[in-house]
Amino acid sequence: MDASNLKEKADNFNPEHKEGPVARTIEEYTAKLPSDLFLWAALGSMAVSATLKIMKKDDEALFVGQWPAPFLLLGLYNKIVKVEGHEGEKRGDKRPGGAGGGNS
């Protein structure tokens, strides 16, 4: 199998750029969560981490201290899904060649 054949197969694998069923299901459920939930989770984990550090439980403090970044990333993902919708369905896909590609 040569490189050009492999590139052609990769280019034609998902020409409509559709999400898979797992990602679609996750997006449907996460879009229902309020965005500030993730912010409060991040702030709460920082507070718990600081409390554990004060209590001289350094390993636990470090473990919980790793949580804010993933919570904030999940919140960002949640916000993008809410604003953009599932694959542009809620407001029309504005990408060239997309479903709602014209001016409305």
Image (spheres, rainbow, N blue to C red):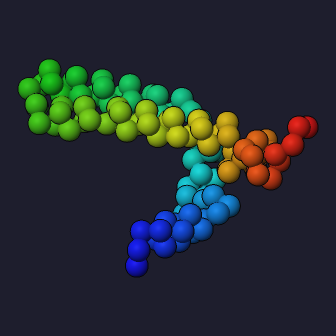
Farthest bottom residue in view: 1
x, y (%) of residue 1? 40, 79
Closer to the camera in the image, 56 or 36: 36
Closer to the camera in the image, 11 or 56: 11
Q: Residue at x 91, y 37 (%)?
A: 104
Q: Which residue is drawn at 56% across and 40% down?
A: 78
Farthest right residue in view: 104
Q: Can residue 58 be seen in this view?
A: yes
How many numbered discs, if any?
0
Position of residue 17 in the picture relative to residue 6 (left or right): right
Q: In this view, does 11 lie above or below 66?
A: below
In the picture, residue 82 is in which quadrant?
top right
In the picture, residue 13 is in which quadrant?
bottom right
Closer to the camera in the image, 67 or 102: 102
x, y (%) of residue 52? 18, 28
Position of residue 21 in the picture relative to residue 56 (left or right): right
Position of residue 92 in the picture relative to residue 47 (left or right): right
Q: Can residue 90 be seen in this view?
A: no
Q: Is residue 93 above or below residue 73?
A: below
Q: Residue at x 25, y 31 (%)?
A: 65
Q: Is residue 38 above or below residue 81?
A: above
x, y (%) of residue 7? 49, 66
